[in-house]
Image (cartoon, rainbow, N blue to C red):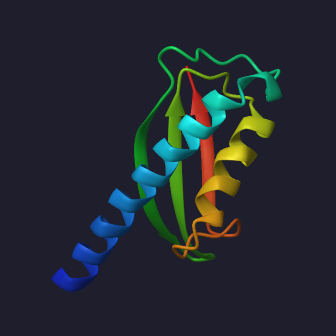
Amino acid sequence: MTSNDDTARHRDDLKLLKSLANKGLVAARLRRDHFTEAINWGDLRCVEVGYTVTLEGEYYQVLIEEANPSCPKFCEFIREIITAAGEGFDSFNLEVRTAW
């Protein structure tokens, strides 16, 4: 079982992750010419963040809506913005996905 301290820490991590993802979206909008993928810039938003523990390890997820589910360049850009913040999220434990 997880303790209340662990739960609170994960909630804080998720709030921070969503904030960083939204900062990444602001940065992406400023560089929208950089992306050729189908993205609805007007409604683009982070709708969900999560934390998962598996037998292989732990990882965080970010789900951004209003972009083609196949946007590897855009997802990598958002992942780089998040990991560059130096808040403990790295490319090995972070998945960024897009959906319509």
Q: Can residue 1 be seen in this view?
A: no
Residue 39 in percent (x, y) is at 65, 18
Most extreme residue toward the left is: 4
Q: In the image, is 12 to the left or to the right of 92?
A: left
Quarter of the C terminus within the rendering: top right
Name above or below for residue 45 compared with residue 79: above
Residue at x 74% of width, y 29% of height: 70
Residue 37 in percent (x, y) is at 78, 22
Name above or below for residue 87 compared with residue 96: below
Name above or below for residue 44 compared with residue 95: above
Q: In the image, is 34 to the left or to the right of 68?
A: right
Residue at x 41% of width, y 50% of height: 18
Residue 10 in percent (x, y) is at 33, 71
Judge by depth and name the residue closer to the eye, 8 or 84.
84
Residue at x 70% of width, y 69% of height: 92
Name above or below for residue 23 compared with residue 55: above
Residue 22 in percent (x, y) is at 47, 42
Q: Is residue 75 visible?
A: yes
Residue at x 47% of width, y 17% of height: 43
Q: In which quarter of the image is residue 12?
A: bottom left
Judge by depth and name the residue closer to the eye, 54 or 42.
42
Q: In the image, is 18 to the left or to the right of 27?
A: left
Q: In which quarter of the image is residue 81?
A: bottom right
Quarter of the N terminus within the rendering: bottom left
